[in-house]
Amino acid sequence: MNYSTTIANEHFDHLLLNAGGIFCESVDQLEKIQHAPGAGAVMTKSATAEKRAGNPNPRYFTYPDHHNTINAMGLPNLGIDYYLDYVLHHQLTLPTILSVVGLSEEEILANLKKIQASGYDGLIELNLSCPNVPGKPQIAYDFDTTDHLLDRIYSFFTGHLGVKLPPYFDMAHFDRIAKILNQYPLAYVNAVNSVGNGLVIDPETDRVVLMAKGGFGGLGGAQIKATALANVRALRLRLKPEIKIIGTGGVTTGRDVYDHLLCGADLVSVGSQLAIEGPSIFQRLEDELEAIFAEKHIESLDQVRGKLKRLDEAE
Ligand code: DHB
């Protein structure tokens, strides 16, 4: 299959990348994704202005079924200068997306100003949806704040920007966020971040599994697939075509990648299952996807992308 895909000025030869937060905190980890067979891009860990240790351990838990996770990482990262140096000065094999975040609007703006001043011309992802910093709400659940922030960003910013969104669960919220995002020259949206503030209980001890936040944490893995697909589909139906979509959530098999494509994803990222299996997962998923294309006699991505059918439409 020809997987050739473009977002803004970046060209991708494969569809899959690491989801934010997974295998992307250190140069050592990032390099493993750069060189993973089947990987199409690399996402860096969301960077704050200063490096952060994150929340106390245990802060990441894999369910015994090996397909689901809950985390309360709390944005451990090595700081914007570290990741900016990586994308500017390392020999990168794959298109690399620089992810930024901030604990305040001013910090976000300062990070973007620093990136712009550096001359970096690649894709940037603004994380509007970290659920794990105690006392800090997920920005993109506050529609007025999101609109105001994007307005301030685009008063000076000329780079290629995407936004990472939290999952929405109400049709009125899909309408509302899409209407806001359509006002701006965004390169893409990434849907979805982890499903915030779930709670997992250890049946042996009757205790929570995470230290931070009383055990509340962001859910990932197979359990969030239907939510992720709904968000990709709902956004694809509402966003202007210039805004591309990275589909994230619930990918453990090639069929899951295929379903994200049907809903309209341009690229697909893998989080929990990448953490469980390691970077060899990209080739496995691509091989499974190829098998589906062969079985269905699909010869081009255009035959799949966004082609999900409703039951009241002709087959
Ligand atoms: C963290 C968790 C997330 O789900 C996310 O998108 C960003 C950051 C974290 O806790 O570090």
Image (cartoon, rainbow, N blue to C red):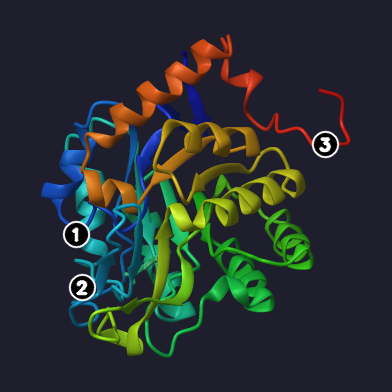
Q: Give the mark, 1 or 2, whose residue is nearer the N terminus.
A: 2
Count of numbered circles in the view: 3
Local packing at callout 3 (Cα closer than 10 Å; few below 14, some 14-19, many 20+) is: few
**Which residue is disc 3 drawn over?**
311
- Residue with the mark numbered 2: 51
Residue 253: x and y, percent?
41, 36
Q: Is residue 282 visible?
A: yes
Q: Three-letter amino acid code at disc 3? A: Leu
**x, y (%) of residue 183?**
73, 56
Which of the labelled discs sits on residue 201, or is there none? none
- The answer to whether the residue bearing label 3 lies less than 8 angstroms from the nearest atom of ligand 1 is no
In the picture provided, is 88 more to the left or to the right than 117?
left
- Residue shown at the point (35%, 68%) measured from the top left: 70
On screen, residue 251 above or below 315: below
Q: Quadrant of the C terminus?
A: top right
- Real-space CA distance between mark 2 and mark 3, rounded to the nearest whole angstrom: 50 Å
The residue sitting at the left extreme is 28
Q: CA distance from mark 1 to mark 3?
A: 49 Å
Whether the residues at callouts 1 and 2 have beta carbons within 8 Å, the answer is yes
Q: Quadrant of ligand 1?
A: bottom left
Q: Residues within 10 Å of mark 1 (few under 14, many from 20)?
A: some
